[in-house]
Image: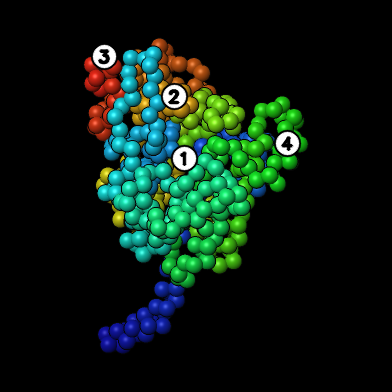
Amino acid sequence: MALQRFFYSLFLFLFQAPSFLQAQESPPNIVFILTDDLGYTDLPSYGNPFQEAPNLDFLAANGIRFTDAYSSSPVCSPSRAGLLTGIHSTRYGLTNFIAGNRKADSLSIDPASWNPFLEGSQVTLAELFQEKGYETAMIGKWHLGNQDDQTPWAQGFDYSRMIGKNGLDYYHYGIFEDSYEKIFQDSGTYYLTDRLTDYALEFLDKKEENQPFFLYLSYSVPHVFVVPRGDKVSKYLRKYEQFGGKYNPYYAAMIESVDDGIGFILEKLKAKGLDKNTLIIFTSDNGGVGLPELGPIPTNLEPLRKWKGHPYEGGIRVPLIAFWPEKIQPQVSSFPTTNLDFAPTFAEIAGLSPQTAWDGVSLKNSWLDKNESTRETPLFWHYPHFSNQLGMPAAAVRKGDWKLILHYETQKIELYNLAEDISESRNLMSENPEKASELYTVLYEWLIETKANLPVEKSTGRPIVLRAPK
């Protein structure tokens, strides 16, 4: 009898194993689309009545649209570093955008000393995906260093197309292809945004048939210069007066080119049978530009306060959409999240090796199980510099609905309840001294723990000394 049960069990295994194995899910593909200086209010799905972006509307309507998503820095290089490493860039001193060295002669402090590149020793998401058998691609803006060990092809990307020359000029630029030895240069023929999309499509065509992939598509749009494709501007010019001149037609046309690119990628994924098992993420590296810089003001971020380079909501709150057919159900999420959360999320979804140094939390449950709970860990920002957009050295922390901002020169603090005041117009410091003290202590301890680089006192030439919590 025992022998009969054994052969019966063996029979079931041999004949049911194939169907069982077929039922196992393949590792998901991931397309991560990053825009440059796209503001929180710049998309139709985030309330912009002027912009047209049907493909992003589709992703937002059929995926998760986050209302409280953040970059980990108000400027690009630290934000991008945090995204790719899962570690707050304060921990390794990359706290400003590369080439950012503005000072303020009238103030008592100078900016902090900092590390102007992502060290090659940092473990990137691409390296972890490679370790798991993924094909990896980086296309577009890198802005994390240009030494040999700091390039995308040295940091885990199999296929690299890095903007490397005239990155602000959308019709006269150079793109390095897998090394510094080969460069594609354009002099007025291909619109840069379209060229980046074409590279993404080329990668999808060339990738191995059954190998999962991680595609990091880093558009330079809508960063200044504000140079659109000429054939996309007219419809926005026609409706310019309908909105009282509030919106920039050229800026809108630039964003539409990104939306077109997303449409082509969706079509390619479907044509290759990859659409059902591909997670698409769309977000921005920081807030939009709110002052004239290399041209007129690009965007209007109302009701948010300030813009890129500031720790107020306009500088750090960004659009975030996650789309995964049949996995993610359509929803709007108010769960506070930062781009540091992508690494632990991808680790759980794709089986990457988790890193103990990661600062984010996994969003898998809220994405796939709709099990949204209160975020227990605070969100932190540290910007000890002077930004091109007149941002001042400052730090901030958000915990729950409460946010505290610390201004480094004066060491004055501001306290806001974001659930009641998204515009950060009412400083509640005097009304809620206990809450202010609680959040200041949290921020102070984090700055000490991360060995944060602090602005320098001009009178002593030494970093400022933070006031200890009471």
The earlier-in-sequence mark between 1 and 2 is 1
- Type of amino acid under label 2: Gly
Image position of 40 with respect to 110: above or below: below
Q: Nearer the viewer, residue 378 or 203?
A: 203
The earlier-in-sequence mark between 4 and 2 is 4
Q: Which residue is under mark 1?
A: 285
Whether tag 4 and tag 3 are in contact, CB under 8 A, the answer is no
Q: Quadrant of the N terminus?
A: bottom left
Q: Which residue is under mark 4?
A: 237
Which mark's residue is nearer the viewer, 1 or 2?
Answer: 2
Q: Nearer the viewer, residue 455 or 322?
A: 455
Residue drawn at 71 percent across, 26 percent down:
244
Work out how far the residue at label 3 is from the one at label 2, CA to CA, in angstroms. Answer: 22 Å
- Type of amino acid under label 1: Asp
Work out how far the residue at label 4 is from the one at label 1, CA to CA, in angstroms. Answer: 28 Å
Q: Nearer the viewer, residue 448 or 179?
A: 179
- Type of amino acid under label 3: Ser
Image position of 167 with respect to 412: above or below: below
125 to the left or right of 459: right
SS of the residue at dot 3?
loop
The earlier-in-sequence mark between 4 and 3 is 4
Work out how far the residue at label 4 is from the one at label 2, CA to CA, in angstroms. Answer: 31 Å
Q: Which residue is under mark 3?
A: 459
Pinpoint residue 39: horizontal percent, then vertical percent. Answer: 54, 35
Residue drawn at 42 percent across, 78 percent down:
18
Q: Quadrant of the C terminus?
A: top left
Residue 391 is tagged as: 2
